[in-house]
Amino acid sequence: MSLVENIPLNYGNIICKCNLVDCICMTKEYVEEIKSKNYQEYICGEYKEGRYAWILEDIQPLKQPIKAKGI
């Protein structure tokens, strides 16, 4: 299954701005809920017990990506 066809991914770039409104520690139940209710999101992320999920709002894509380098 292909979620994105012929669109290059922007690794190493800032591609949007948003507000981080919550950070949730993933439980087994949370992971199962995401898997059953939003499978596409589930397969695009790394949903594992003990990791954290960022809850974002007001997501605004940027017209031009900004190069960024992680630490």
Image: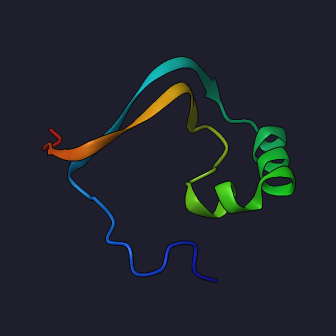
Nearest the viewer among 33 and 25 is 33
Specify whether 28 is left or right of 9: right
Specify whether 27 is left or right of 15: right
- Compared to 62, does 3 lie above or below? below
Specify whether 12 is left or right of 55: left
Q: Quadrant of residue 55?
A: top right
Of the 4 image quadrants, the one containing the N terminus is bottom right
Q: Which residue sits at x=49%, y=31%?
A: 59
- Compared to 29, does 55 lie above or below? above
Specify whether 2 is left or right of 32: left
Of the 4 image quadrants, the one containing the C terminus is top left
Image colouring: rainbow
Residue found farthest to the top: 21
Q: Which residue sits at x=66%, y=55%?
A: 41
Residue found farthest to the front: 63
How many numbered marks have been drawn onto this rendered protein structure? 0
Give the x, y percent position of residue 47: 63, 50
Nearest the viewer among 20 and 64 is 64
Nearest the viewer among 12 and 28 is 12
Q: Which residue sits at x=20%, y=53%?
A: 12
Give the x, y percent position of residue 21: 56, 16
- Compared to 25, does 14 lie above or below? below
Give the x, y percent position of residue 11: 26, 58
Q: Which residue sits at x=76%, y=60%?
A: 39
